[in-house]
Image (tube, coloured by chain):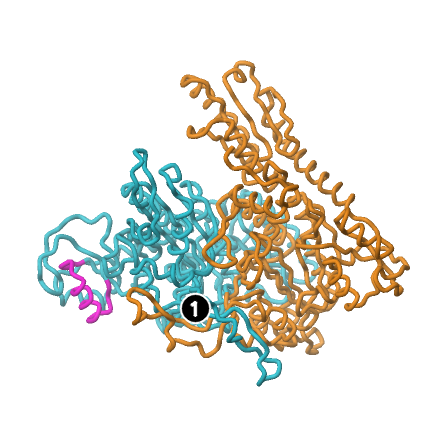
Chain colours: A orange, B cyan
Amino acid sequence: MSKALTTRAEDYSQWYNDLVIKGGLADYSAVRGCMVIKPYGFALWENMRDQLDKMFKDTGHVNAYFPLFVPKSLFEAEEKNAEGFAKECAIVTHYRLKADPDHKGKLMVDPEAKLEEELIVRPTSEAIIWNTYKGWIQSYRDLPILINQWANVVRWEMRTRLFLRTAEFLWQEGHTAHATREEAIIETEKMLDVYAEFVEEYMAVPVIKGIKTANERFAGAEETYCIEAMMQDGKALQAGTSHFLGQNFAKAFDVKFSDKNNTLDYVWATSWGVSTRLIGALIMAHSDDQGLIMPPRIAPVQVVIVPVYKGDDSKPVIDEKANALAKELKALGIRVKFDDSDNSRPGWKFAEYELKGVPVRIAMGLRDIDNNVVELARRDTKDKQTVSMEGLPAYVSGLLEEIQLNIYNRAKAFQTEHINTADTWEDFIKVLDEKGGFVSAHWDGTAETEEAIKEKTKATIRCIPLNNVPEAGQCILTGKPSTQRVLFARAY
Amino acid sequence: MSKALTTRAEDYSQWYNDLVIKGGLADYSAVRGCMVIKPYGFALWENMRDQLDKMFKDTGHVNAYFPLFVPKSLFEAEEKNAEGFAKECAIVTHYRLKADPDHKGKLMVDPEAKLEEELIVRPTSEAIIWNTYKGWIQSYRDLPILINQWANVVRWEMRTRLFLRTAEFLWQEGHTAHATREEAIIETEKMLDVYAEFVEEYMAVPVIKGIKTANERFAGAEETYCIEAMMQDGKALQAGTSHFLGQNFAKAFDVKFSDKNNTLDYVWATSWGVSTRLIGALIMAHSDDQGLIMPPRIAPVQVVIVPVYKGDDSKPVIDEKANALAKELKALGIRVKFDDSDNSRPGWKFAEYELKGVPVRIAMGLRDIDNNVVELARRDTKDKQTVSMEGLPAYVSGLLEEIQLNIYNRAKAFQTEHINTADTWEDFIKVLDEKGGFVSAHWDGTAETEEAIKEKTKATIRCIPLNNVPEAGQCILTGKPSTQRVLFARAY
């Protein structure tokens, strides 16, 4: 195989890039920090998006679409939110190009086409959406509003990585409006649960649900809930966030409603989002040195059939059997590809589909057909077995579920093994540097200590787990009293 | 009903705006020329998108995603394309805001964060995509590339109208690469056929397939194919275009491939797109003075059940029957809504769903239940009938197909009636001003004459129909010889 991959042990970061590029998921582009999502990567995103979209709709949400641009005066209305994103905004200042008189055939920005007010390319849409909701909400009868949008957003990051941190990315952002604080909090928590269910059951990535500290909170939120996933290098990856926004945006945009008693009050808000970053999490949670490992439930191709031709007359016989099998698998709703292309040999194809992480590979030659069997290989364990064609579709269907479960269990075992407690600073450093993963430790609750720990170790508080049990202890750094442990980790 | 609509006769343009706004499809936004697509409008777009997406995939295409931004140097590479879009580009020049020292709490563009090279917000993606294809294509084995992308694009239009012409709009753009001229032309025509099939069979809007004159061609194309629809005011609306791009973009971006004989040649290209503009076409083709008329196949809600409660004890009885019916309809794949909300009366709801264009309305009261019937109203004809509950779901299913066909036939009859020939200039003016619609007339084939006719009448050549029969004649304006008729119309 010409596409030699870097191994995780050699260079974890290069291994990741190799998988993304050589696995055909994405490519660099001519635009600084922006990526091209290639067809294989986009098919994966479509499967993720469609499942999430279904789950949003099943929980009562509808989709809509709001403008890409946010006028500066709206952008700055919620001050904390604006401050949080101000340093990473792409800004449209002009609306026309003209011929450059000094360079024939070239264009230049027309200085006469300067916008009166600059437009921010949305880094997130609270401002433009709450400015719109203002016109839609008068009374409690107009509530709740449960809207989601699938969109591209831009955050001008200085250091970018394919999928994990790109200047433009695709995401969904839910923006809901409620009559009461309680209802908004219930919504925030409900959507966190939807995210956790999706990431665990479809992406097969176990997560920890928790709450962010004030330091790590979304700019403009009262509380940020999150799910944190663990990568194979022990680092954390924030996989989704759900924000309780209180009345901050309603106040910034003056959105009030009259309740049943005709009393005016500001509307309560939530927002929640996941992005193409999840693809990065998927790759780093499951893949190995031979390539990607796709969870069957969202794999673009679940089963590939590779024919092993010997001599020209074997082709029609094998093709007929393979097409029949593909048809039977499709009838069960399985995404199957029969690769009868003749410009590469079976060995090359085996390596290619291993690299692409196709969960099940079926090889079929003349002798197999004579014996009424196929050779079946699992991507997750690399086990190969000879299986009878009798009842094969049902067997494959069951196997896909088994693989889904197996890679979840494997990731879960890894996660469990890499969540360790530390009770002294020495222990803390040791666990972080030697075992990696998440460290469950006491913290005195102050932003200063959190910052100091980050300075010293690059570890941040990933979350205060939702299922935390109160426990008296002493802060790992300052020795001050603490009432519960929090999870620290180095993070993407 | 409080939502009095402007009638078509009073003010066609205001009637259109009323339907969009009061029908809940879209709303104006705080950003000049940009709209908010509301949940009802977006649900319609989702149905259109999903069907188109299926048709693209059935014809061998895959989806991908390319950056929102196009660096100026790439944008200007294909000169005609660049020239065509230069005057309507949103341009990103800076990547950071900072606190405004003169206005507390306000932000300003940070002059130190000026981009070295300006970024154009894509008005169309040929440039960024062909710059990417350059890295993907070496040999004939890499061809064809059959990629589509669903995206937002920005064209800084001076005069905007909801759906019809907005600064930002949603669309899909297919970008394919081929080894031969013939193959690219076949692709261009195939996608025109896909568009025509979609618009006629799903949107129930009849179209004329044709080719644009050089004047109306896409900037950078060798040939632009189009489908033209007719609105109820007789004006034309270009509903989709498919471009044969020749080797223009391959040459601009130096994209060559080696063929089987190892000869290098430039790659052949097509691009094709339809947008949220189609929603404008849908509205203006079918709707009436009472509101929208949705074609059943893509209607967000196909059937609405409105309960007619009389006294509190009727509610449980009616709700049970209505829910059972809704369940049966859903089982047939019908999109049904049971509106049991108690904050408005049946009459208000009837008007509301008429305004929203729901194809079938079922009203259900206690007496109906006693008689085992419902009252069923068709939106297209406004016919009401009492129908037995026995076999109702199958009846409704058939009725939806009948409505789909009926509104297509109605639009088709209108179209046929409004395509007229003219053989003299006087006739031409008369038909245009009195009958409206499309005028089939001779033209001498020059851009000057086309321009002169446009000056005098505001009518443009919509297309040279694909099914044209050669016919000797004289140009309507200049009297010069002509070999075929073309279609003129005033257009959106």
A3 left or right of B263? right
Above or below for A356 versus A247: above
B115 left or right of A377? left
For the C terminus of chain A, which image quadrant? bottom right
Residue A390 point in image, percent of width and height = 59, 20
Which residue is situated farthest in the top direction here? Answer: A370
Seen from the viewer's position, the closer of residues A167 and B487 is A167
Q: Which residues are magenta?
A: B441-460
- The residue tagged 1 is B91
Magenta highlight on residue B454: yes
| Disc 1 element | strand
Q: Is residue A103 visible?
A: yes
Picture residue at 72% right of the left edge, 68% below the top: A222
Q: Chain of mark 1?
A: B
Q: Is residue B399 visible?
A: no
Above or below for A261 versus A452: below
Seen from the viewer's position, the closer of residues A212 and B72 is B72
Residue A12 image-quadrant placement: top right
Seen from the viewer's position, the closer of residues B422 and B6 is B422
Picture residue at 31% right of the left edge, 63% below the top: B84
Magenta highlight on residue A468: no
What count of labels does the image hold? 1
Residue B303 point in image, percent of width and height = 52, 53
Above or below for A209 versus B291: above
Tell me the crowding category of disc 1: few under 14, some 14 to 19, or many 20 or more residues within 10 angstroms, Cα based: many
Residue A368 image-quadrant placement: top right
Q: Amino acid at mark 1?
A: Ile
Residue B62 image-quadrant placement: top left
Residue A6 point in image, percent of width and height = 59, 41
